[in-house]
Image (cartoon, grey):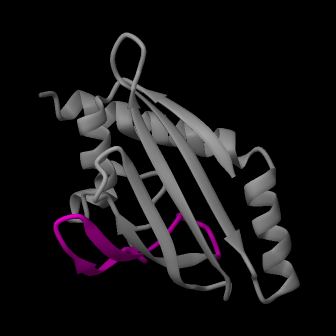
Amino acid sequence: MRFNVITRASPEQVLRALTDFTDRRVQIWSRTLDPKTFEVRGLGDSWAVARESTPGSPFWVVARYDWSDPTVVRWTEEESSYGGNGSGSVRIAPGDGGGSRLEVEWSSNDPRRTRDKIMLFLLHHGPMNHVISRLWASALNRYAESHSK
């Protein structure tokens, strides 16, 4: 899955929102992160390991996040409910006239069950990239409004 996000949030705000693994993460990403499954398993200065899922989704993942490069947040799935693995990244760049432009790439592969293969195919090849892009833009715009410099 690939998609772009245009947001009013500055690159610094985007990085903070993507890498906040405190209890605020559930508030920042309230429409895309299920508080019932969110669990931080490890945290460092430029990395985190967390269990996460989307509300209503049958899938959860344990992902290792890395933001040692402040213009890119990367993640690698260490465990998943579907038995596969995946990875992704968000490239953060200043937007034209302010805000930020994000380039998101996300792949999941090797599910064990046919049902999961179909669901993941639809997630990554259907209209979900547009839905997720809009949800992320909304979350980041709210974050920018509530966390002005």
Where on the picture, by quarter, is residue 60?
bottom right
> Which percent across, then down, holds residue 93?
40, 32
Q: Residue at x 54, y 60 (%)?
A: 88
The image shows residue 29 at horizontal and vertical percentages of: 39, 52
Q: Is residue 95 above or below residue 15?
A: above
Residue 38 colored in magenta in the image = yes
Which picture quadrant has residue 48?
bottom left
x, y percentage for residue 74?
44, 60
Q: Residue at x 34, y 52 (%)?
A: 18
Work out whether residue 108 or residue 8 is closer to the camera in this orientation and state it. Answer: 108
> Is 97 rendered above or below residue 62?
above
Report the side of 77 relative to 117 (left or right): left
Q: Is residue 37 magenta?
A: yes
User: In the rendered structure, which segment of residues is drawn in magenta?
Assistant: 36-58
Kindly identify the residue that appears in the image at 20 percent across and 33 percent down.
Answer: 146
Left or right: 89 with respect to 68?
right
* Residue for point 81% across, 59% down: 122
Q: Is residue 126 above or below residue 9?
A: below
